[in-house]
Amino acid sequence: MKKEDNSPPILEILDDDYLSSAETIFTISDCSEPAYGCFLEGKSTASWYPNSEKDECDTEVIAEAKVASILHQGYSNKAIYEWLDNHSSDFSSAGELLLDLLDWEGENLDEEIRCSTTRIIILEKFEVKAKYRNKGIGKFLARKILHSAAAKGECVVVQPDLGTENGNEPERLKKFWLGLDKGMKYSAQFNTIYTSIFD
């Protein structure tokens, strides 16, 4: 007897952008200069409308993320590093990478970030809900969340957990995040993935 397929019509989400939505709600962090909103912490969700064909508007969350948004124009790379260091040790690799990329005098200065962007968006955590995993929509949802966090045209840094604990597969994760946008690069030195300008 053929097993009935009760999986949600995932291809519909990919075929019709209006069947899904994402939002990021930011709060001002006290890690930098709160009065200017230089460091924002965001919680993101991606949802879809599973009963849209019945004209029902109920939504179901299919992915969640934590995002940081950092204003870098007018601030030194050392100041940004200190903000990240004040936030948590989780941002140490991203902080060290940015210390390197934003150094006017350094040989690894990334002029695109320094001169063509105003904010750095760090995707701290990203998770697709269990029943929606391994269905080919992870990148779609990650991009949707980043766009909701105003990442388009800005520098995006991703800090995936590339350790082998908890069943992680580092090479698969690297391949996933490097495929997120055409400009994605992997820094082996800082074990971090980034793009100068996110499309």
Image: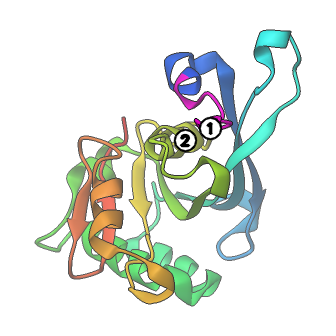
Q: Answer left or right for 18 relative to 34.
A: left
Residue in the image at 43% along x and 70% along y: 160
Q: Is residue 129 visible?
A: no
| Protein image colouring | rainbow
Q: Is residue 162 visible?
A: yes
Residue 190 colored in magenta in the image: no
Q: Answer left or right for 44 relative to 1.
A: right
**Element on which disc 1 rests:** helix
Q: x, y (%) of residue 37?
A: 70, 57
The three-letter code of the residue at mark 1 reads Ser
Which segment did they paint magenta?
1-11
Q: Quadrant location of the C terminus?
A: top left
Give the dominant element type of the magenta stretch: helix, strand or loop. loop
Alpha carbon separation for disc pair 2 and 1: 11 Å
Q: Nearer the viewer, residue 88 or 158?
A: 158
- Residue 102: assigned label: none
Q: x, y (%) of residue 128?
A: 60, 54
**Residue 43 higher or lower than 23, as above or below:** below
Residue underneath mark 2: 141
Residue underneath mark 1: 148
Q: x, y (%) of residue 57?
A: 87, 20
Residue in the image at 61% along x and 47% along y: 132
**Residue 176 higher or lower than 9, as above or below:** below
Residue in the image at 37% along x and 42% along y: 198
**Element on which disc 2 rests:** helix
- Name the mark nearer the viewer: 2 or 1: 2
